[in-house]
Amino acid sequence: MTHSQLSNWQQLSTLATGIKQQQLNDLFKEDPQRFDHFSVQLPSVLLDYSKNLITKEIFSKLIGLAEETQVTNWRDQMFSGDKINKTENRAVLHTALRSGSDTPLIVDGVDVSEQVSLELAKMKSFVDEFRQGHWLGYSGKRITDIVNIGVGGSNLGPQMVTEALKHDSDDTVRVHYVSNVDGAQIAEVLRPLSPEKVLFIVSSKTFTTTETMTNAQTAIKWLTAASFDEKAVAKHFVAVTANKSNAEKFGIASDNIFKMWDWVGGRFSLWSAIGLPIALDLGYDKFEQLLAGAKAMDEHFSSAPLTENMPVIMALLSVCLLYTSPSPRD
């Protein structure tokens, strides 16, 4: 059955014509308690969706749509490590990155929980060494700048968090992001920096991504031109990848390679070692707080009824936007 054949989808299609003619001011006048009806409050988060073009009837149909499409069943399969990514036949387990659980979670015969714990411990050790000033560049000077090289989620996730939480940074290090392949961006980022004080983080699940590898090669040439020594790479490059052998072939020391897994989608990867720039900028304790916040939302998502479930409601509102956005003819 296609989505257009679902009962609640068809009813939403019918309701769409009327709601697109409504004004928010009128909806608030008709229902003075609209905020109470269309908001969810958690101890540290408020979701106010009262300013969306939505009515109690539409909300009811949206919840019905979630039930018709078995959202809770898919959610439970995701948390269990089932391979719900049907196109790639993979599990979708970014939730395991921030669960903090010692309970075994087996995927393809491997305990995912144990792997995550080991990699987080490696991250913590590296971040603490770095922020305490023990990780030095090829000339013995302390690193002052980090350049993260990656595209998609390997760039946008960490960059979003470091920008959003910049007031929580103690300025131990400056973080820069490079994702554009045309060379102008990395040239502009590197221009004011000192090669002996820069650490590059090359983030790529496959370590074959054209944009990332091109920029990484530019960074290596820039570093070795200043140091006159290819061995300097060991002090100035770390990698985050699911393909360790490719990273080693590229020239990055084995101990400087952090692991991610194919069951982590790029857009959800900041909770893994892809979040290394975040931890280096804010400190590992604050990175742990970030993980804890995500875990709290995961627990809410897994237990709250659909009518009070923030992630579900936000997803349903995006469906609602399909109907309430003006068409090109409007």
Image (cartoon, rainbow, N blue to C red):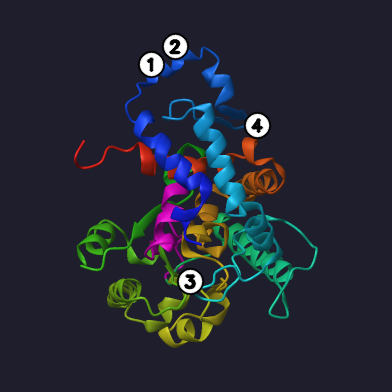
Amino acid of disc 2: Lys
Label disc, if present, on residue 42 of the rendered structure: 4
Q: Vertical placement of 141 versus 61: above or below?
A: below
Say what secondary structure mark 1 lies in: helix
Identity, as a three-letter code, of the amino acid under mark 4: Leu
In this view, the residue in front, 20 or 188, is: 20
Q: Secondary structure at mark 4?
A: loop
The residue under label 1 is 25
| 3D distance between C-alphas at marks 4 and 3 | 39 Å
Q: CA distance from mark 2 to mark 3?
A: 58 Å
Dot placed on the residue nearer the N-terminal end, 2 or 3: 2
Identify the residue at horizontal 52%, vertical 19% (top origin). Answer: 34
**What residue is pinned by disc 3?**
238
Q: Nearer the viewer, mark 1 or mark 3?
A: 1
Q: Quadrant of residue 232?
A: bottom left
Q: Which residues are magenta?
A: 139-161
Q: Quadrant of residue 196?
A: bottom left
Question: What residue is disc 2 on?
Answer: 29
Q: Are marks 1 and 2 in contact (CB under 8 Å)?
A: yes
Q: Amino acid at mark 3?
A: Val
Q: Give percent across and percent down for residue 301.
A: 65, 46
**In the image, what residue type sits under mark 1?**
Asn
For the question of whether residue 311 can be seen, the reply is no
